[in-house]
Amino acid sequence: MSTAQTERQEAARLPDGDVVRVLLEQHARIRDLFAEVKNAQGELKQNRFDELRALLAVHETAEELVLRPIAKKTAGEAEVEARNHEEEEANHVLAELEKMDVNSMDFDAKLADFERSVIDHAEHEEREEFPAVRHGCQQDQLNGMGSRLQTVEKMAPTHPHPTAAGSPTAQMLTGPFAAMVDRVKDAIGSGGR
């Protein structure tokens, strides 16, 4: 099992802008945020959860739109389908968590289960998908993907949208409108609650 520190170390060995480096750095931040949510209380806990929720939402959308088409060629369709299915399931749980009181015991229990599934998903990507993508692409392609990934994340929804999760086509069709609505919610501070 990797840790945030090992993910950061592995990322640091890759060139700036490399898509795998960007994703590993985000995986490390996701681990950090899970720990911060678990250790916080009150408004700080809500703020950390909101940050985690937004990062997961944009991260998964960008992976589905940028990484998965290449991974389908390099890692295979079965690998891509497995990761997309996991993301679809995670999106449903994230939507449930978003509606819960972060200070409840039920939230903590559901968050712990969710963390295990998210970490398991990330580790599958790191072991199976990322090496295949790196092996199947030239460095300029990996850097181009990194750039596209970061662009997509700037336009991606910041809240879970289970009806689009796991489907790049649905993400392309609903993503821009959902992102606009999400960012308005975030700006007015409702956090979707």
Image: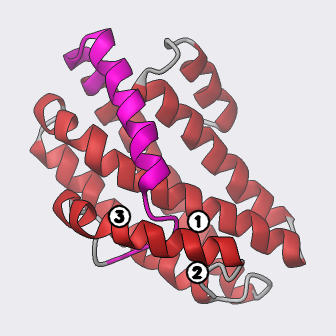
Mark 3: give few (<14), some (14-19) or many (20+) Cα within 10 Å: some
Query: Given the image, on which type of amino acid does mark 3 rest?
Result: Pro
Q: For the residue labelled by badge 2, is the local secondary structure a helix, a strand or a loop?
A: helix
Residue type indicated by callout 2? Leu
Q: Position of residue 192 (x, y in %)?
A: 59, 83
Q: Give the range drawn in magenta.
A: 133-162
Q: Which residue is drawn at 43% across and 21% down?
A: 18
Percent across and percent down for residue 36 are 79, 57
Q: Is residue 155 left or right of residue 97?
A: left
Pointer 2 with pointer 3, Cβ within 8 A: no
Crowding near the residue tagged with mark 1, few <14, some 14–19, many ≥20 C-alpha atoms within 10 Å? many
Check if mark 1's residue and mark 2's residue have beta carbons within 8 Å: yes
Q: Please identify the quadrant where the N terminus is shown.
A: top right
Tell me, for residue 176, which label it has, or none: 3
| Image location of residue 170, percent across then percent down | 21, 67
Dot 2 alpha-carbon crowd within 10 angstroms: few under 14, some 14 to 19, many 20 or more: some
Q: List x then y, in percent, for residue 109.
A: 66, 79
